Amino acid sequence: MAVCPVNAIERAEKAIIVNEQTCIGCKMCAVVCPFGAIHPSGTSTAGVAGISYPTPNQPRGTSPLLAWSIGVYTCAVKCDLCSTLGPDEEPHCVGACPTKALFVRDATTLTGIRKDKMRAAVAENQIMMGRSTNLKEA
């Protein structure tokens, strides 16, 4: 949020929201997002009008953060967790996921999960250290 030069990114009740009308397409938010959740996206004026003009394409190896095309307005796009839903409603993707792999976590739940994972990693590391010590002695 702090890197946005036009303050197009705000913290809402449920999620971080990108105001696509305010966004100037600088892509700084996509560069610094630690989760990789913000993507530059855009539609050419030819696509909006329903007509096709041959515009240059980027080489396949070009990162989406570096790619650009003539006549394409780019803005930041990010999931807003269906922020228009009520407080007890889940985002639509959670209910539509056929494998039930998606779920919503809040900050307090994530903090607890993170601590549990750190404790498990420390315990595993101690076990491995004990095994390596035993191997050296043998």
Image: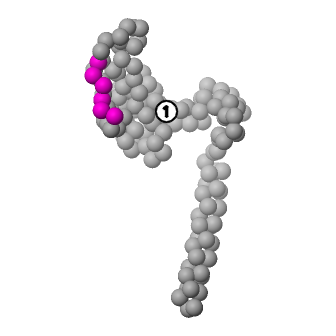
Quadrant of the rendered image containing residue 21: top left
Which residues are drawn in magenta?
A: 55-60
Q: Is residue 115 magenta?
A: no
| Helix, strand or loop: magenta stretch | loop
Residue drawn at x 63%, y 66% is 120
- Classify 129 as above or below 67: below
Query: Residue 135 vs residue 73: left or right?
Result: right
Q: Secondary structure at mark 1?
A: loop
Is any atom of residue 113 visible in this view?
A: yes
Residue 136 picture location, percent across and down: 53, 88
- Classify 101 as above or below 80: below
The furthest residue to the right: 88
Disc count in the image?
1
Residue behind mark 1? 78
Quarter placement of the C terminus: bottom right
Residue 87 picture location, percent across and down: 68, 32
Three-letter amino acid code of the residue under disc 1: Lys
Residue drawn at x 67%, y 34% is 97
Quarter placement of the N terminus: top left
Quadrant of the rendered image containing residue 121: bottom right
Is any atom of residue 90 visible in this view?
A: no
- Classify 58 as above or below 34: above
Q: Report the front residue among 6 and 68.
A: 68
